[in-house]
Each structure stands twice: as C-alpha cells, then as structure tokens.
Image (tube, rainbow, N blue to C red):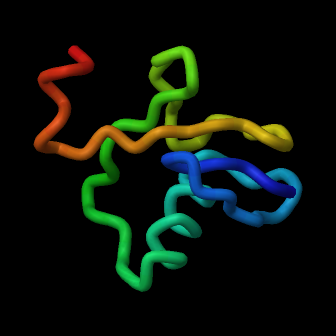
Amino acid sequence: MRVFVNDKSIRIFTGAKAVDAIHAYYKSRHTTAPEPLPLIKDRYSNLIEPDGSLSPDNHLFIVEPANTSNYE
C-alpha cells in the first residue's frame, strides 16, 4: 500500500498503522525515528494517533519538535 509522509511516497504493508508509516519514512531517510515519536497530523491538520489505521494514499505529516508551537 502507498501512503505519503511529508509528501514522500512510502510503500508499507496493508493493515499498517501510522507508526509503521513513520518508521518507514525515517528508514527511507537512513535514520531512526526519534523517541518519543513526534506528533502526526493528516492533510487536514487532525492529530493522528500512532496506532491509527491507514488507507491507501493517506497523507501524513510529522510535526518536528521545533515546530510544535505552530500546531498547538
């Protein structure tokens, strides 16, 4: 299944959760996901829980810690 994280196309398995997409995104950048995970938002700026279900072509955005004041 294809989803987008920060506008980057990511291939993940069907049934994956938001956390799986975030980890795949960081892996594609050859780095590890930070702990704790940053906030995850959808294309409408709704907060997505790490265990949130995904469907094909979902768009997720990582809110980096330095940018959290813009989303509170």
**Image point 61% across, 59% down: which residue?**
20
Residues 15 and 68: in front is: 68
Q: In which quadrant of the rendered view does residue 42 lie?
A: top right
**Image point 11% across, 42% down: which residue?**
66
**Image point 55% across, 15% down: which residue?**
44
Q: What x and y, as percent, mark residue 49? A: 51, 33
Vertical side of 19 occupied by 61: above or below: above
Q: What x and y, as percent, mark residue 9? A: 68, 58
Q: What x and y, as percent, mark residue 58? A: 72, 37
**Quadrant including the C terminus:** top left
**Quadrant including the N terminus:** bottom right
Q: What x and y, as percent, mark residue 17? A: 67, 48
Vertical side of 27 occupied by 70: above or below: above
51 sits left or right of 55 in the view: left
Residues 37 and 65: in front is: 65
**Image point 56% across, 47% down: which residue?**
7
63 sits left or right of 51 in the view: left
46 sits left or right of 37 in the view: right
